[in-house]
Amino acid sequence: MNPTFIVDHYAVSPQIQSDDVVTLKQSGFVAIVCNRPDGEDTDQPTAAQIGAAAKEQNMSFIHLPMNGPMMTHEQLEQLDVFLNENEGKVFSYCRSGNRSNIMYQALLEKRNT
């Protein structure tokens, strides 16, 4: 796991495992966003598994699955609220990190309009 920071408080990465959550917490992250739909690969952990690991570390978690580069207005609103409720570093992941970056960039554009 090698997070790429989009801004100083928001990083994206490819798929993580449940045991990576401890490392994220130790690295100062306070919340996790999953943009990957469950079941894309047979060996990927579910969002619920990552969410449970986050809860064990007292971290916030939200599942906002994107199919390809498509997202909904509701998902952007949910991300905006989630980020406002979680001050500090937020980690977001999907299969490659690309969808997580796309969603965050879309949120920035929405905020600037």
Image: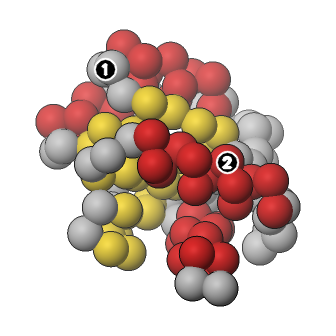
Q: Residue at x 24, y 34 (%)?
A: 25
In this rendering, does residue 9 appear at all? yes
Tags 1 and 2 touching, CB below 8 Å: no
Q: Residue at x 47, y 50 (%)?
A: 83
Number of numbered markers: 2
Side (left or right) of 53 relative to 69: left
Q: Nearer the viewer, residue 41 or 32?
A: 32
Give SS at disc 1. loop
- Residue 32 in which image quadrant: top left
Alpha carbon of mark 1 to alpha carbon of mark 2: how far? 22 Å
Q: Quadrant of residue 86?
A: top left
> Which residue is denoted by mark 1 in the rendering?
57
Tell me how the rendering is colored.
secondary structure
Q: Position of residue 103 (x, y in %)?
A: 63, 68
Up/down of 49 relative to 47, above or below: above
> Which residue: 45% across, 40% down?
85
| Residue type beneath disc 2 | Gln
Mark linked to residue 78: 2
Counting residues from the start of the chain, the first of labels 1 and 2 encountered is 1
Looking at the image, which is closer to me, 104 or 92? 104
On screen, residue 95 above or below 5: above
Q: Label 1 sits on what residue type?
A: Gln
Where does the C terminus fall, quadrant-wise? Answer: bottom right
Image-quadrant location for residue 22: top left
> Mark 1 or 2, which is nearer the eye?
2
Q: Is residue 35 above or below residue 28?
A: below
